[in-house]
Image (spheres, rainbow, N blue to C red):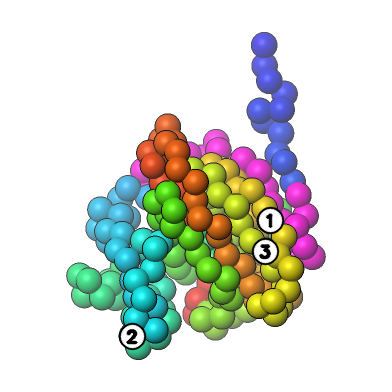
Amino acid sequence: MADLFAESLREVRLQCGAWLFGGFAASRMPALIAALDAVTSAAPFRHMETPGGRRMSVATTGCGAVAWVSDGGGYRYSPHDPESRQPWPALPDAFRTLAHGAAELAGFPGFEPDTCLINRYAPGARLSLHRDVDERDFGAPIVSVSLGLPATFLFGGPHRGDVAQRVPLAHGDVVVWGGAVRRHYHGVLPVADGRHALLGRCRVNLTLRKAR
Ligand code: MD6
Ligand code: FE
């Protein structure tokens, strides 16, 4: 018997301008994972250092015309992978079309990302509260795609000390946020141990942005 709920979209408005589209990426999974594998073969995950010299527990890589990097010199977007000194892999169509569609559904038509930051969390890895303020164009939203193990996302306010909403994110969930909340503090609690059928012992998050 067909499961009606399997096809229905779980839409939750988290804050003004921020939407969770539960399972939005589920039907596009084979193409997304093939694209992810292609990008990470060309630009493997690595643990970058914070400007303060700490090794991030999250492993990162990226793709697009530029991609986000962090080292002793600070956070910035770079056209080259500092490991290979080559340009980053191109932004896969599967990433671009998913981001465009999710942004449109959230009320941000015409979103054309030029970069994707890819974060990989082993069990225990976390992302402390931060704001995404290295992009030039705050009018564009950010589209975030969760893959693999589940995690708890912390969605705070404009100040670091603001109470954060706890949002459970699972494989296939997509979050879009733009407008005023685009610059709010957010983070990810330590990922609990487990094994995901497609990705194994990790959570992967794609964040698609317009950096330039
Ligand atoms: C993550 N995401 O979910 C980390 N930033 O692994 C982020 O830091 C993030 O999901 C900006 C916009 C959306 C996000
Ligand atoms: Fe962020």
Q: In which quarter of the image is residue 57?
A: bottom left
What are the residue bounds of the magenta stretch? Answer: 12-35
Give the labeled residue for mark 1: 166
Give ligand 1's quarter of the image: bottom right
Q: Which residue appears at 47% of the width and 69% of the height?
A: 114
Residue 149 rendering spot, x and y as whole percentages: 49, 43
Give the labeled residue for mark 3: 155
Q: Which residue appears at 74% of the width and 46% of the height?
A: 11
Cβ–Cβ under 8 Å for marks 3 and 1 = yes
Please tell me whether mark 2 sits on a helix, a strand or a loop. loop
Please tell me whether mark 1 sits on a helix, a strand or a loop. strand
Q: Which amino acid does label 2 sit on?
A: Gly
Residue 112 in view of the camera:
no
Residue 158 rendering spot, x and y as whole percentages: 71, 78
Q: Is residue 109 above or below residue 211?
A: above
Give the labeled residue for mark 2: 72
Q: Earlier in the sequence, mark 2 or mark 3?
A: 2
Q: Please state if 140 lies on the left or on the right of 47 as rendered.
A: right
Q: Please state if 144 lies on the left or on the right of 162 as rendered.
A: left
Q: What residue type is labelled 3?
A: Phe
The crowding category of the residue bearing disc 1, from other C-alpha atoms within 10 Å (few below 14, some 14 to 19, many at least 20), is some
Q: Which of 154 and 40 is in front in this view?
A: 154
Marks 1 and 2, Cα distance to the nearest angstrom? 31 Å
The number of callouts visible is: 3
